[in-house]
Structure formats: structure tokens, C-alpha cells
Amino acid sequence: MSRYWSELVAGLEPYVPGEQPQDTSFIKLNTNESPYPPSPAVAEIVHGFAADELRRYPDPESRELVAALADYHGVDRDEVFVGNGSDEVLAHAFLGLLQKPAPIRFPDISYSFYPVYCALYRIAFEAIALDSRLRVDVDAFCEPCGGVVLPNPNAPTGIALGLDALRRLLAAQRDVAVIVDEAYVDFGADSAVGLIGEFDNLLVVRTFSKSRSLAGLRLGYALGQAQLIEGLQRVKNSFNSYPIDRIACAAGVAAIGDEAYFRACRERIVASRERLAGELARLGFEVCPSHANFLFARHASAAAGEIYTGLRSAGILVRHFDQPRIDDYLRISIGSDADCDALIAVLEKILS
Amino acid sequence: MSRYWSELVAGLEPYVPGEQPQDTSFIKLNTNESPYPPSPAVAEIVHGFAADELRRYPDPESRELVAALADYHGVDRDEVFVGNGSDEVLAHAFLGLLQKPAPIRFPDISYSFYPVYCALYRIAFEAIALDSRLRVDVDAFCEPCGGVVLPNPNAPTGIALGLDALRRLLAAQRDVAVIVDEAYVDFGADSAVGLIGEFDNLLVVRTFSKSRSLAGLRLGYALGQAQLIEGLQRVKNSFNSYPIDRIACAAGVAAIGDEAYFRACRERIVASRERLAGELARLGFEVCPSHANFLFARHASAAAGEIYTGLRSAGILVRHFDQPRIDDYLRISIGSDADCDALIAVLEKILS
């Protein structure tokens, strides 16, 4: 605590990201990164980048990247907003669209950055309980409120909602913004992007960090009707005119352009997920039905904290959230098949 | 205006950066970029970057870059904060250190992003008038207030304060944070970094965009005692855990490591500035004494708007601020000697 801090600062409880050890010998299944490198087209852009261009500011509008994303998703260019990772996009969306008199709503078990944004921007919220099977109860999100944030699939459960449920929610919340956080949508859930034309209250948030293997480059974006996007632009242009650097912009365009590679990685990860889910069930885990690049699972008898520690000692990092209702679960990112095999082998020892 | 916007958004008047034309044939003297490429060590890092690493999140603390900056400036590692450009660093500092009951103070003619941050974070401010020769009146900044932001050298004037004046200000404002924005300090002004040990209310903000030729990579930082830095960390970790991407972090370390190149570029720019100042004076301009990589000048008879337009037609971009007190001035970034020669040649035609 310092007397120079704003009153706000003392009350913040910052987000704690998953561990990022410097020691690269860990099998790292704790932050939902991709086990596969980014598209070779990204490497080509980086390695051929004209370093002299770095002396110039980037395009403040990142128009090349915006155009690539608009074409890819079949929306207009003024329906795309890009940011320095989807966390930045979400932050601007909370301030720009969710700072409302009425409390906003998001699930009680969800991305733990949401309540942090609320503290940062003094936004009141109600955390709506997942049901006993850790599913989102859509009806509870249809009640009057200041806005809704829903990850689909949800994290850390991996459970997805269908488009019918989202459509019902969007129709019920015509007066407030509904943010659907699709960080993990590429691994099998239905995207709400196709509903943008129908619902002017819908903002879909995406990231390059998972299915595009670019967590290290910091790129995220949002899609929505032009007026919502303009709200985000106004916040962004009051915060940092140039959030996307020149290399990231060009690399993002390259990643979006390599559809074949994207599909191949995604299919491998989905196949590994289904195989790992089966193995975990065989070992006595109850596994949430996942549409993401991770599994959320609890063991019938062994304590999650002890499994976490045992895995860590064996050089495998997974995530254990020490919080009510989910402290008996582990969240396990889908690695390569070799990573999954190593995980299973260690679990067999721990649980034997 | 959209009903989905927060009340705040409708009231924002976003910052307008200098023009960034796609047309690269312009001689671009409007946004204070470097005429020289970044250090060859930066190109080496980029071209040799292991693209596979991009699938992993970066170190959320950017420890390698923080360590390089701490060593370079002779401060502790917990006295360094890094951000996605100094605009982001300033934004976090405004929210974390300047959101106070009493209005903060900054010069009326200064970096025009400051009042934008105030609107974003609902911070009251008083714009303190520069004197008739466009100099900062330090005494006016010693009056009780909620905090102070002072660019040194000031922009767009280029005029610098000495350390005695800054020391007087810091001593008078012991109870509030004083931010010295040193974006342009490397071109000849005295840095306040040496005062950090003495004043726990001092935050010095720096950028890689000017003297390091890395505007396109988005890197900025702040130096101050650990408690001030912790205040910024708490805001950052409530906004975006990973603001610095892996390539930018490594390239920043490389840039800081190449002191010889840095000094050589700086000396060339200072020499070009002095030569250009002489030429402008010869052509009838009154030129503010600049310690920055730009000149702020007005002509004895020709209107600034007309000179701006004439230069633009000839393919040379400079900046004209169409606002009270300075609308008869032009701000001209220091280009290469060839850029300066081209500018002088066109000015000679326009003014003849």
C-alpha cells in the first residue's frame, strides 16, 4: 500500500495467470496453449520481416489484419475490433459496454478475469451459479441485468452451449450487451458469429492464443455490429492508439490465411482430447464433456491437490483451482499425443 | 451513439494520432519517428526467432526486458515497469496514481493524450498555461494538487526543464505522484532517473519509439521506487497479464544492449536538428530551442496552415496543430539529412 496509489488500486485483487515456469523441461498442460507450432506462414513472415519498418508506428487501425478477419468471418470491416490479446479486448468491452447501473451477470465458475475487470472499472456483478453438473443455466441469464458475459465453451469446464440457447439469451437481453467469449470455440462448439446480423447486442470475442498457436504474440479480436465495435474503438483510442505491433499484425494475417494448417491442428487436438478423456475415465476420473482444448475432471477417490502435486513432481504441470465447488477438479490442457501418454503413465503410478 | 455503450463512452473524445499514410512515398516528418532503422541486433533477433516459441504465453512479468532496463539505468528490478508502448504505461499510471480527489496538473500545450486519459478515468485536471515563450512555469506546478504530469522535454515545443527545476517541483509535491514523461529525453535533456532514489513520488516514463527506432514494436516503460511500480503492476494485472509479446521482449533486450548504435543515431539526429534549426531561422522561422527529435517553429509572415499544405502537396508531411496559441506553429520531426535538405528546398519555394 502506498499513499500515492489511487483509492482504486488498493482494492484490486489482480488476476493470477497459470504458472509460466522458465524451466522448459516441464510438460506444460496448465495454460491451454497449443502443442503445435503456429503455421509455417507465420515463421516466414517473422523471419523475412524488414526490420527497418519497425522505426515507423504501425497502422493505428491495423487495417490489414481487420480486413483478413472480416473476410474470414464474412463480416464487414467495421464489425471487427482487434487488440493486444483477447484480455485487452475484454477489458475494453467491460469498460465500453458493461459499465452500467444494473449489475452484469456471468457464471460463478468461469474465466476468473471477469470479476477482476469489474473491480478495475467499478462494475457491479452477480455471479450466477452453474448447475450441479457444472452447466450454464441459460434461464438465469435471461433475467433483467446490466449485461451478460458468457464464455462458450465455458472455462474451466469445457462445456458448450448450443446456438438455440444463445439465441434465447440474446432475444431476452435486447436492451444490454451480451459478450460471448469464444476463446475455445474452434475445438468443436458452435460459434455465435452467425448471429451477429440478427442481434445488435451481441459481441463475440476471439483469440489467436489457442487454436492459432500464437499465445506468445498477443492477438485477440471482437466481432459485432458496427455500433458495438465503435464503442470499443472509442475506448481503445482513449487508451493506446497503436495496440498491435507491426510484426504481430503481419503474422496474424498469415495465420488466418493458412486454413489447411489450422484445420489439421484442430483435428489433431480434438482427437487427442477424445482419446485422453477415455483414458482418464478408465483411471477413475469423471470428465466434463469438453468442446475445448482442455479437460476438466475429478477423480472418484484421489484428492485433486495431491494429484496436482504428484504430477508436478514428475514434471507435468496441470491447473488446480483451489476454490469452492471445483477444488476437487483438475484442468488439463490437451498436449501432443506424447504429452498425453506421459500424463497417463504418471497418473497410473500416482493412482495405483 | 449506441444504447449499448457505457455512459462514459459517449463522452470520450479519443486521441487523434498523427497521420500514418499507407503511401510510403511521403517524407514523413509528422510523428517523431527515427529516420534510422533499429539496431542490427534487433533484426538479428527477429530473423532468428524460433517461431515455435510463439505457441507459449510470454513471461507475464517480462523479466528479461525488466532486467535489461534495470541494469541499463542502474535501478532495481522492482523499480521497472514495462508496457505495450509508453501510451499504455501512461494510461495505467493515470488510473493507478492520478485518480485523486484533487485535480491533477499538466501544461495546457503538451501531449494531447493527457486530457484523453483524464476523460477515460474521470480524473479532474487543470491545464497550466505555458508562458509567453512556451516554457513551463514550474512554480505553477508546485501548488497543491492531485498530481503532476510533465513531459521533459515538453512536446510539441521541444523545450526542456533543468534538474534543479524538477527537484524543486518534486520537493513541493511530496504528497502526490509526479510523472515525468521522458519520451524525448535522449536527444539532449537531463533525465530525472537519477532523482528516483531521492523522491518516492517520482515516476519517469520512457519509450522505445523515438531514440530506439522501435515505434512499430510498441515498447514503453516506467522507472520509480518499488511502491509506485507495484501500483502500476496491480493495474496491469487487472487489465492484461501479458502485454509484451515474446518477439518484442527479446527485441527490446537487444536494442538496450547496443549502446554504440544508440549513441551514434542520437548524435546524428542532434546534429541534423541543429543544422535544420539554423536553416529554418535563415528562412524566417522563429524556432523554439529544442532538446527533442523535432523542432517547433513559426514563420514571421507565412501562415502555418498554408506551409503545411504546401509541404504536403510536395510530398512532405509535418504536423500542424489547429488549436489556440500554437496554430501558427509547425512541428517538424528530424529526418535524415537528405529529408532535411528536401524540406528546406520545398520551404524555399513555398516562401519565395
Image: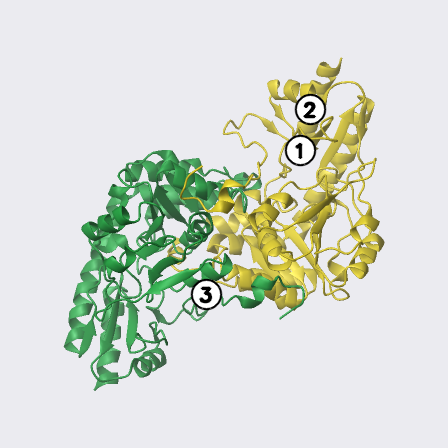
Chain colours: A yellow, B green
Counting the numbered discs, the total is: 3
Residue at position x 36%, y 51% from top? B208
Disc 2 crowd, CA 10 A, few/some/many (<14, 14-19, 20+): many
Q: Which residue is mark 1?
A: A335
Q: Quadrant of residue A346?
A: top right
Q: Position of residue A281 (x, y in %)?
A: 82, 26
Callout 1, which amino acid? Gly
Compute the Cα span from label 3 to label 2: 50 Å
Identify the secondary structure beneath mark 3.
loop
Image height check: is B20 above or below A290?
below
Q: Quadrant of residue A310?
A: top right
Residue at position x 83%, y 57% from top? A168
Between B127 and A291, the one lying in front of the other is: B127
Locate the C terminus of chain B by quadrant: bottom left
Q: Position of residue B286 (x, y in %)?
A: 19, 74
Q: Position of residue B323 (x, y in %)?
A: 36, 75
- Circle nearer the N terminus (2, 1): 1
Disc 1 crowd, CA 10 A, few/some/many (<14, 14-19, 20+): many
Mark 3, chain letter? B
Q: Quadrant of residue A330?
A: top right
Q: Mark 3, mark 2: which one is toward the viewer? A: 3
Dot 3 and dot 2 residues touching (CB under 8 Å): no
Is residue A150 visible in the rendered image? The answer is no
Between B80 and A251, the one lying in front of the other is: B80
Residue at position x 64%, y 31% from top? A29
Q: Which residue is mark 3?
A: B15
Q: Position of residue A309 (x, y in %)?
A: 64, 20
Callout 2, which amino acid? Leu
Dot 2 and dot 1 residues touching (CB under 8 Å): yes
Q: Which residue is mark 2?
A: A343
